[in-house]
C-alpha cells in the first residue's frame, strides 16, 4: 500500500493520465460517494427515529374515558385516583380542552368547539422505569371507571419501530451496493485500459518489466483516481446534507435527515472505502488481464 503514495514516472506512463477511463473512474467514484453519503445519512436518521419512537412510546400510555359530558369530571377524578395509587405509574395528567383541540386540529381544523361534541377525556400516563401491570390496571379501571380504555401503544409502536429499523437497514445495504458498483466500474475501466495498452505492456515485458511492476502502475493510478473522485463526491454530499433543514417538532421526518455530533466522521470513511474497493478490483483485474496477454 505504501507504494501507492510513491510516484514512479516510468510506471505512470503505462496508464494514460487522461481519457475516457480516467474520466469514467473519477466521475463514477464521485457520484457513488455522493449517494453513499445520503445513504449513510438516511441510515443514521432512521436509527435515531427508531430509538426515539421506542423510548418515548414505550414509557407513555393513554387513558380514554368515554361518557356523557356531565359524568366526565367525576370519572376523570376516579381514574386519576386509581392511576396515582398504581405502582409503576410515574405521573398522570388529564389533557385540557386546548390540548385535545390541538390533537383534533389536523382533521377538523383549528376552530373546533369541543363543548358541542361528545369528545372523550384523554389522560396521559407516563410509566416509571419499573413499569406497571397494564392487565391489572385495565381490570381495575373497568370495574371503577365505566367507559375507560387504556392504550399502552404497543399495538402500533412495534410496527413503527420495525419500519424505522428496516429503513436503517436499507440505508446500509444501499451504501454496500454503491461500494460494489464502484468496484465493478473500476474493474471494467481497468480491463479497458489494460486492453488498450496491450502493445505497451508487451514492450515493457521485452525490456524486463515484471507483471507485478506493470500491475502496480495500474493499481496505483486507478486507486488514486477513485480516492480523488470519492473525496470530491463526499465533500459535496456532506455540504448538501448540511444544508438540509434541521429537525423540529413540527416538521416531518425528512427534515431530520443528516448527521449529528460524531456521526459527521462517518462519511469521511467513504473515500477510503472507495479507494480500498478500487485497489482490490484493479489488482484482480490486472492479474487476470496480464495472464490473458501473456
Image (spheres, rainbow, N blue to C red):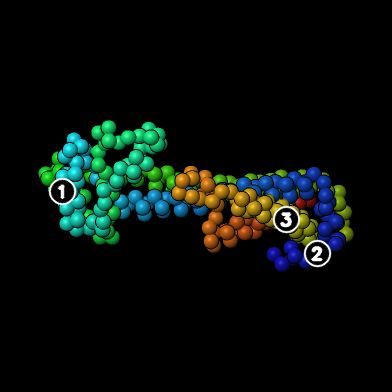
Whether 206 is drawn above or below 102: the answer is below
Q: Residues within 10 Å of mark 2 (few under 14, many from 20)?
A: few
Q: Position of residue 115 (x, y in %)?
A: 27, 35
Taking the spot 75% from the left edge, 65% from the top edge, the residue there is 5
Residue at numbered disc 2:
7
Q: From the viewer's perspective, is 88 left or right of 41?
A: left
Label 3: few (<14), some (14–19) or many (≥20) C-alpha neighbours in 10 Å: many
Residue 24 rendering spot, x and y as whole percentages: 75, 45
How many residues crowd around disc 1 within 10 Å: few (fewer than 14), some, or many (20 or more)?
Answer: some
In terms of secondary structure, where does tag 2 sit?
A: loop
Q: Secondary structure at mark 1?
A: helix
| Residue drawn at (66%, 56%) of the image | 271
Tell me which numbered mark, 3 or 2, is placed earlier along the sequence.
2
Question: In the image, 71: left or right of 108?
Answer: left
Number of numbered tags placed on the structure image: 3
Task: Locate residue 115 relative to residue 267 in the image: left or right.
Answer: left
Quadrant (top left/top right/bottom left/bottom right) for the N terminus: bottom right
> Which residue in the structure is indicated by mark 3?
228
Q: Position of residue 286 (x, y in %)?
A: 73, 52
Q: Look at 74% across and 54% down and name the residue there.
A: 225
Label 1 vs 2, first from the N-terminus: 2
Q: Give the mark toward the camera: 1 or 2.
A: 1
The quadrant in which residue 114 appears is top left
Kind of element beneath mark 3: helix
Can residue 98 be seen here?
yes
Residue 125 or residue 213, whichever sits in front: 125
Determine which residue is flagged by label 1. 78
Q: CA distance from mark 1 to mark 3?
A: 69 Å
Q: Is residue 137 left or right of residue 128?
A: left
Task: State how far apart marks 1 and 2 are (Cα).
Answer: 82 Å
Amino acid at each position: 500500500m505504501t507504494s501507492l503514495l510513491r510516484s514512479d514516472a516510468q510506471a505512470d506512463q503505462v496508464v494514460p493520465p487522461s481519457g475516457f477511463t480516467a474520466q469514467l473512474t473519477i466521475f463514477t467514484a464521485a457520484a457513488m460517494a455522493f449517494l453513499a453519503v445520503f445513504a449513510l445519512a438516511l441510515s443514521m436518521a432512521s436509527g435515531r427515529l427508531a430509538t426515539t419512537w421506542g423510548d418515548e412510546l414505550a414509557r407513555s400510555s393513554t387513558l380514554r374515558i368515554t361518557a356523557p359530558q356531565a359524568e366526565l369530571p367525576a370519572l376523570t377524578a376516579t381514574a386519576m385516583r386509581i392511576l396515582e395509587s398504581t405502582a409503576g405509574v410515574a405521573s398522570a395528567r388529564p389533557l385540557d380542552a386546548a390540548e385535545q383541540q390541538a390533537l383534533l386540529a389536523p382533521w377538523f381544523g383549528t376552530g373546533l368547539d369541543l363543548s358541542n361534541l361528545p369528545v372523550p377525556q384523554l389522560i396521559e400516563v407516563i410509566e416509571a422505569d419499573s413499569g406497571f401491570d397494564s392487565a391489572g390496571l385495565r381490570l381495575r379501571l373497568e370495574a371503577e371507571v365505566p367507559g375507560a380504555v387504556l392504550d399502552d401503544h404497543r399495538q402500533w409502536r412495534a410496527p413503527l419501530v420495525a419500519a424505522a429499523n428496516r429503513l436503517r437497514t436499507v440505508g446500509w445495504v444501499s451504501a454496500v451496493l454503491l461500494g460494489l458498483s464502484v468496484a465493478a466500474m473500476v474493474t471494467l475501466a481497468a480491463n479497458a485500459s489494460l486492453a488498450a495498452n496491450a502493445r505497451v505492456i508487451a514492450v515493457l515485458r521485452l525490456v524486463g518489466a515484471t507483471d507485478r511492476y506493470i500491475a502496480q502502475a495500474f493499481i496505483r493510478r486507478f486507486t488514486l483516481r477513485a480516492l480523488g473522485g470519492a473525496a470530491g463526491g463526499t465533500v459535496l454530499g456532506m455540504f448538501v446534507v448540511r444544508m438540509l433543514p434541521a429537525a423540529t417538532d413540527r416538521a416531518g421526518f425528512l427534515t431530520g435527515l443528516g448527521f449529528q455530533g460524531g456521526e459527521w466522521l462517518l462519511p469521511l470513511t467513504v473515500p477510503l472505502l472507495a479507494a480500498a474497493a478500487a485497489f482490490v478490483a484493479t489488482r484482480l483485474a490486472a492479474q487476470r488481464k496480464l495472464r490473458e496477454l501473456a
